[in-house]
């Protein structure tokens, strides 16, 4: 029995080693196969990324570019890129819903010659979900193919909207100083000079560094400071006039200056009147904002806007100069605030954009002198600055200009009179950023000429 047992024992171990060896061999083969698959997958993915980056770079250089790439040899594989650039208009284009395997689809517009190929792999005509069409977006669909495997990346780009800034200035002849408080993203496309101890709660970026003055010279940057950031005040107001529901202008053919009063009421209405060439003001009329300006844009051509009140709704008001002396300004005759303050009512949909080709000013009058001023809006001054009239800066009173929103201007304006680095009269600048502007903005608010990446789908 001992000999037979030894033989059986040897046979048993041999069988075990044969089975284990077979498994090791299988594992090795599968490991090699997996490694090859992962390699092919990674290369196809990298080719798709390269195509997306190449196309994005072309759009950054030329926002109207939409040529794409067709069967472009790259790294042993092929790049195919389709660009849907809606900013150039829809003439001769077909709108369809492109449905990659990884999400619910993207509305794009393409040449009619490319439609059949898209329909063949599951796309369908019309916008995704039957929704509306975004006329300010570029979509890049990049397909990288390697050894028969295709990977797809979808990149969406939009112009950057200036309303996302709490403060934006091309230059600063007035300096943030002691008593001034700023919130939200703050950018100066030059050197930032501070005086005393102004407070910045949002991140501050500049192009040419920081200069600190005053005693003590100690600005407070609570969300960081970065220099070397170049963000020129490139603007694109395309669509403001064409999308305006109401346009005020001189219809006599003389191109006279047209001044308009817009007084907002808490019942979602506006009371308006106008004066041509400095003449008598017309009788005030009151109408619902949604009836008066269903698109959300009121446009004054060659004139000024005088405004105040309580806004219930979403609106952008525009004053243009068009080479007319004394035009293109917006004046606050009193407080202008939202009916529902988003700081206490997060569901508020009240939102105001104020656009002036020239300056934006707080009027020096009986209702503004000797009191705090409250302004709820994102304000954009194309060629000027934003702040009080001179009489309010020199008044024998030290108050606060409480701003909810943002200021975007060519230059910064002084708001108070100082003794050393201490404000002694005028209005201290107290700013709160409206965080809603990170995601949504007033109707047709100015945006940059070029695009930025807003989403990247893989």
Image (cartoon, rainbow, N blue to C red):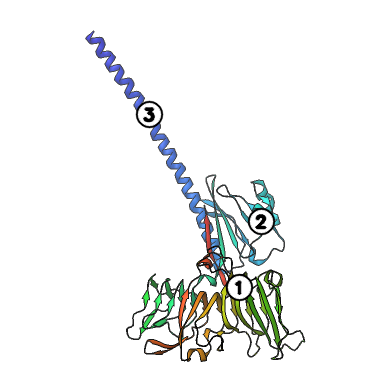
Q: Residue at x 33, y 20 (%)?
A: 15
Judging by the rendered image, the residue that carries numbered circle 1 is 311
Q: Is residue 34 visible?
A: yes
Report x, y in % for residue 260. Answer: 67, 83
Q: Residue at x 40, y 31 (%)?
A: 26
Report x, y in % for residue 286. Answer: 70, 76
Say which label, 3 or 2, has the lower sequence index: 3
Question: Which circle, 3 or 2, is nearer the viewer?
Answer: 2
**Viewer-side residue, 406 vs 398:** 398
**Viewer-side residue, 140 vs 133:** 133
Judging by the rendered image, the residue that carries numbered circle 2 is 131
Q: Quadrant of residue 338?
A: bottom right
Report x, y in % for residue 195. Answer: 38, 84
Q: Residues within 10 Å of mark 3 (few under 14, many from 20)?
A: few
In the displayed structure, 426 sits above or below 42; it is: below
**Viewer-side residue, 338 vs 357:** 338
Question: Which circle, 2 or 1, is nearer the viewer?
Answer: 1
- Secondary-structure class at tag 2: loop
Which dot marks residue 23?
A: 3
Q: Residue furthest left?
A: 2
Q: Quadrant of the N terminus?
A: top left
Say which label, 2 or 1, has the lower sequence index: 2
**Would you say the residues marked 2 and 1 are in contact, meaning their CB atoms lie under 8 Å apart?**
no
Say which label, 1 or 3, has the lower sequence index: 3
- Secondary-structure class at tag 3: helix
């Amino acid at each position: 029995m001992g000999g037979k047992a030894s033989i059986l024992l040897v046979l048993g171990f041999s069988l075990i080693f044969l089975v284990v060896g077979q498994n090791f061999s299988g594992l090795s083969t599968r490991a090699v196969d997996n490694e090859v698959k992962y390699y092919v997958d990674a290369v196809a993915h990298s080719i798709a990324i390269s195509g997306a980056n190449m196309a994005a770079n072309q759009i950054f250089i030329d926002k109207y570019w939409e040529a794409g790439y067709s069967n472009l040899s790259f790294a042993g594989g092929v790049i195919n890129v389709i660009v849907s650039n809606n900013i150039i208009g829809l003439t001769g284009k077909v709108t369809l819903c492109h449905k990659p395997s990884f999400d619910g689809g993207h509305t794009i517009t393409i040449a009619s010659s490319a439609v059949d190929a898209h329909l063949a792999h599951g796309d369908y005509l019309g916008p995704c979900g039957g929704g509306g069409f975004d006329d300010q977006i570029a979509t890049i669909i990049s397909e990288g193919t390697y050894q028969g495997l295709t990977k797809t990346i979808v990149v969406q780009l939009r112009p950057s909207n200036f309303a996302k800034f709490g403060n934006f200035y091309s230059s600063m002849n007035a300096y943030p100083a002691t008593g001034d408080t700023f919130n939200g993203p703050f950018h100066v496309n030059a050197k930032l000079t501070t005086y005393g101890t102004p407070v910045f709660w949002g991140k501050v970026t500049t192009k040419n560094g920081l200069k600190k003055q005053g005693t003590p010279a100690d600005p407070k940057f609570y969300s960081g400071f970065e220099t070397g950031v170049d963000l020129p005040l490139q603007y694109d107001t395309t669509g403001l006039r064409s999308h305006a529901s109401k346009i005020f202008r001189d219809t006599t053919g003389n191109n006279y200056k047209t001044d308009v009063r817009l007084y907002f009421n808490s019942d979602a209405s506006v009371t308006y009147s106008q004066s041509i060439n400095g003449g008598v003001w017309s009788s005030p009329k009151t109408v619902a904002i949604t009836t008066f300006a269903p698109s959300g844009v009121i446009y004054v051509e060659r004139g000024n806007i005088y405004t105040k009140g309580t806004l219930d709704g979403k609106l952008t008001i525009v004053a243009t100069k068009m080479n007319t002396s004394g035009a293109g300004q917006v004046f606050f005759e009193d407080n202008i605030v939202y009916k529902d303050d988003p700081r206490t009512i997060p569901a508020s949909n009240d939102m105001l954009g104020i656009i002036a080709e020239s300056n934006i000013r707080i009027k020096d009058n009986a209702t503004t002198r000797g009191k705090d001023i409250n302004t709820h809006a994102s304000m954009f001054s194309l060629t000027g600055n934003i702040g009080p009239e001179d009489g309010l800066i020199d008044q024998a009173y030290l108050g606060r200009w409480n701003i909810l929103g943002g200021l975007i201007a060519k230059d910064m304006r002084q708001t108070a009179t100082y003794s050393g680095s201490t404000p002694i009269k005028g209005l201290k600048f107290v700013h709160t950023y409206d965080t809603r502007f990170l995601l949504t903005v007033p109707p047709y608010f100015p945006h940059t000429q070029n695009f930025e990446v807003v989403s990247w789908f893989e």
